Every structure is written in structure tokens, then in C-alpha cells.
Amino acid sequence: MERQGLLYVISAPSGAGKTTLCHALIDLLPELGHSISFTTRPIRVGEVDGVDYHFVSPVTFQQMIDDKAFVEWAEVHGNYYGTAVKTLTDACDSGRDILLDIDFQGAVQLKERGVEAVFIFIAPPSFSELESRLRGRNTDSAEVVACRIKNAHGEMQEAKWYDYVIINDDLDVALMELKSVICAERCRSRHMFPIVAQSLNIITSK
Amino acid sequence: MERQGLLYVISAPSGAGKTTLCHALIDLLPELGHSISFTTRPIRVGEVDGVDYHFVSPVTFQQMIDDKAFVEWAEVHGNYYGTAVKTLTDACDSGRDILLDIDFQGAVQLKERGVEAVFIFIAPPSFSELESRLRGRNTDSAEVVACRIKNAHGEMQEAKWYDYVIINDDLDVALMELKSVICAERCRSRHMFPIVAQSLNIITSK
């Protein structure tokens, strides 16, 4: 029985530690694929095209929208980000589980389209901690930090429709919880029962 | 915000390794309570009343049925087994998660009553392995082993309505999966969102 790959969608307010957690998770579970998004955002020093993102021009991105090549896309802070349909179908068909860290707008699109995925929300332990982390990055102006904090208040409301909420207070604890979610979802009866039934040669009349 | 305890219901065909797994799980997660069932079965050498089971007379058991003191009860191989309502409500109110390893008949009763629980099915890797394990125990006659194998074929059908199916081929892998299910379920949005919302002082208008 061929197993279909599962899709894990991870979102978080900026500064909640999603990127660090996702990288640590893939170190722990290297069989997990990491979906590479398309973006119109300029490439940053240290980033690699095709590894961090597929960096494309606004014209190419618009063409992909027109071609319905995206399962979700969103504009965030003036740049476009999108996940190609092909990225997901290829992973699913190959039986490989895939991690998709995307913005809330994109996650909502997947949810509304009824895409079968596990939705995981990473929450900060407090807004003061979130602010402290964002300031500690030293990559954003005070104005941008204030904007991110303001957005985070609204984004936290989204957590209620996610399947799981993980509070990233202690990184090791959050990582263990995230890994547990990935492993547990693989044991879901709807995935496992057909495999068990076939291997045990059970008649599944009903 | 007070957290309510979660209920984990574990069932398996005889010989699938449920008891070993449950004991190993509680060693790993000692905060997890293990529900102690009531039974009319005679106490065996090495068993302790109030630890392995609450051993009661058939008359007492019947009185408890009449008093609706059981959330589930079943007759298995001529003996009665039941879980007291009080065991679950006490655990739930105290915020302690509780493990309930019970027969399929009991699990179905809980499911049909709409008891909020996580249903976990432990499956053997194959019927030949199940047979080999049952014979290896040297506790049952060939006739009893044959009966248990026959029952297992029917019981495996039940796996499809459980939330999770864990194949106990390698004990360490199965234990890791079981632990993941326990930890992941604690991160479910329906449990975590109210806690997060309160700690972040989010207005939950909707």
C-alpha cells in the first residue's frame, strides 16, 4: 500500500520563533521535506535561490497567479509569497511529508480550499517576550517592530481554528511538542488503518 | 485558567503488547494517571488490590451497575470489568491526564456515549507474530490461544473508528509513537487556545 505524503502547515506571528523551530525540526526528522515558496522579495545576503525561496520577478509571479499555479499566495509587507500547487502534489505523490511555513493569509486559503493538511500555530509566551525578541533581532526599525506587535494581536485570534497550538517559551519543549505532532499525525487511524488492514489481510467490508 | 485532564483510551487485541506499552509510557510520563478498573476476576499471584485492579465480588459489581457507577463495563471470558465514573471525573477535575486501557466493548461504550477521549488502538504487526507472542507467554492453552487469534481478526476491524493506530512491531518505536500521541493531543487548539488567549489577554469575541 503506497502511503501519501502529509502536509503540515505552520504559521506564527513574526518573532515567535517559527523559522528556528522548523530548521531544528528538519534536523531531527530529515525525511521531512521543507516546501520552498516563491517570492518577489529581493534575495538577502546569505540566501540561496531554490533553497530559501524561489526568487522570481513580479511579472513571473503574476503569470503564475494567472496560470493558477499557486495553491495559496499572499502579499506581505509589499512583497508576494506563494506556494506552487506542483510542490505539494509532487511531495504528496512521492509519499514524502512536507512542512509548509506560511503566512496566516496563505494558511486561511488552504483551509478554505479544504486542502488536507495539519495546521500548527506557534505562539509566543507573551507579547512582552515577542517584543523583546523582535527588538533583539536588530533587523527592524522601532516602527516596524511596533507594527509587527500590533499585527500579532490580530494574528493570535487565528490560533483558534488551527489544529494545534504550540507555545514557544522554551525552544526544546516547543521542538519536542512539534515533533510529537508530526509523529502523532502519521499514526492517525485514517492513514494507518488502510495500511494495517492490507498488511493483516483484513476484509474491510464496511 | 484551570486545565481539565484528558482521557486516553487504549485497546488492543490480546498479545499486541498493550500492557507492556502502557507501563513503559507511565515510566516516561509519570504525571499520567493510570485508571484502575473494577473486576470480578480472581486476584492472581503478584497482583495487588487497588493497584492492578479493584477486585470486587460479583454482587458488588452488580450493585455498581445498578447504581450506574460505571462509565463502561463488559464481560470478558466470563469475568466482569468496569471503569467507575468517579475515577474519570476525579482525574478530569484534578487536571490530571489519565490512561484507560480497556477492552473493545468498553471503548465502544465510551465512544457511543460521546465521552471526550482520545482513542488509541495498538495493533500487532501480523497475525503470525501475534500467535507467536501468545504462545510464548505460556499462560494459555492452545485452545485459548486459538480463540484469542480468532477474536483478534474481528477486533482489528474496530481500529478504523479509533483516532490513532499504532503498530507494535518494535517496542521502542511504538512507545515513541504512543508518547507522541499523548503529547500532541495536549497541544490541540481546543485545549490550548483558551490558555493562550488568557495568558496573552486576547479578546475572544467570536
Image (tube, coloured by chain):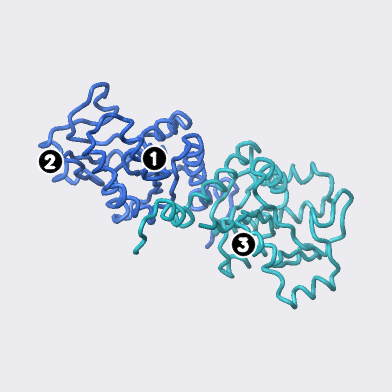
Chain colours: A blue, B cyan
Marker disc for residue A129: 1
Query: Which mark lies nearer to you, 2 or 3?
Result: 3
Q: Amino acid at mark 3?
A: Asp
For residue A183, side relative to residue B172 (left or right): left
Labels 2 and 1 share a subunit = yes
Instruction: Read off the chain for label 1.
Output: A
Q: Residue at x 69, y 66 (%)?
A: B86
Q: CA distance from mark 3 to mark 1?
A: 31 Å
Q: Secondary structure at mark 3?
A: helix
- B111 to A93, vertically: above or below: below
Read off the residue under disc 2.
A63
Could you say where residue A65 lies in the image, as x and y percent from the top left?
Answer: 16, 44
From this viewpoint, which residue is outermost toward the right? B45
Between A171 and B188, the one nearer to me in the picture? A171
Could you say where residue A107 lies in the image, as x and y percent from the top left?
Answer: 31, 48
Q: Are marks 3 and 1 in contact (CB under 8 Å)?
A: no
